[in-house]
Amino acid sequence: MKKTTLYILIAVIAVLLAAAIYLLVDNRQTKDEMQEMVEQMTFEKEQLEDEYEDLALQFDGYGRNLNNDSLADKLAQEQQRVQDLLEELKITKATNARRIAELKKELATVRAVMVEYVHQIDSLSQSNERLTQENTVVKQQYAEASQRATILEEEKVKLTAVVNRAQMLEATGFTMTPLNNRDKKTGRLSKIQKLQFDYNIMKNVAANTGMKRIYLRIIRPDGEVLTKDSQNTFTYEGRNIEYSIAKDFEYGGEQMHDVMYWTVEEMLDPGVYNADFFVEGNLIGSFPFKIGK
């Protein structure tokens, strides 16, 4: 008898437990379905807000350059209407399906009004187009004249550039010789007292003759310029840059040889240096040279 009662009690507990589990699962499924429905309604509401905002921008775009005051006022009124509906939509709960549906209908109505206004704007545009076409010939003539003037100016600039290039000097035949304290060539870094720079200025019958100044920039392996004074600068491409050595010379149009010297008063690092020559604001030669250990 006791066993029978125990079995019955266990069976009842099992049934109650199964029922509780069922209710729990069912309740969770219901909550999930409700959450999914709310998310869908929220998504639709956000889409509707985007459509209202796009429509407001369209009204603004059409009305911005419209010269017809009456039509511009009407567009402004409809734009304000759209803005008011958009503000209402933003504060409307996504779960208010009825009001959301009404606002969708309102959107369709305003769109229809916009289509009508667009037709009127197109009609005005066609009228203005006839006036524009009357000015086309004059504008084309002006454009052609301006283009001819631009072409002539470009040709003038090109010709000037050609002339400048033709007149520009050229340095060639560069050599660098390290000298010791007796002005003898040396290969030992610790013995170098001077750097001798030999170079040629090429013949150029198109160049202007007379006194000129040549600048030499000695650039170290680390990119710095060797200079005795930071005030030693000249103008190149609109800015002042430092130079190492400057020398005046007289140019007669024929090829000439010249030499410049740099007195070593600083520690020279071994490596590849560069010698850049400038005359009259032009880079006339650039030559790498090496100083060994």
Image (tube, helix red, strand yellow):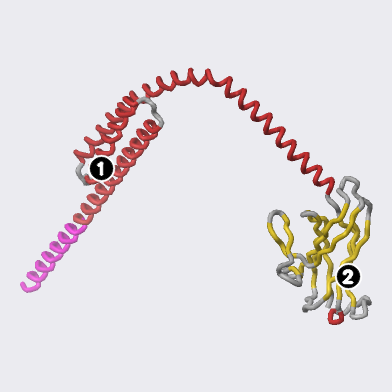
The amino acid type found where label 1 is placed reads Glu
Residue positioned most to the front = 211
Check the picture and name the quadrant holding the C terminus. bottom right
Q: In the picture, residue 116 is in which quadrant? A: top left
The amino acid type found where label 2 is placed reads Gln
Q: Residue at x 86, y 72 (%)?
A: 195
Q: Which residues are magenta?
A: 1-25
55 left or right of 293? left
Residue toward you, 75 or 236: 236
260 left or right of 36? right
Q: Position of residue 272 (x, y in %)?
A: 80, 69
Image height of 124 relative to 258, above or below = above
Residue toward you, 278 or 22: 278
Image height of 129 relative to 259, above or below = above
Q: Residue at x 19, y 61 (%)?
A: 21
Image height of 200 relative to 106, above or below = below
Q: Which residue is mark 1?
A: 87
187 left or right of 229? right
Disc on res. 196: 2
Residue 4 part of the magenta segment: yes
Image height of 51 relative to 235, above or below = above
Residue toward you, 8 or 48: 48
Residue positioned most to the left = 1
Q: Position of residue 142 (x, y in %)?
A: 61, 25
72 left or right of 189? left
Q: Position of residue 189 (x, y in %)?
A: 84, 79
In this view, the mark in front (1 or 2): 2
Q: In the picture, residue 4 is in which quadrant? A: bottom left
Residue toward you, 153 or 103: 153
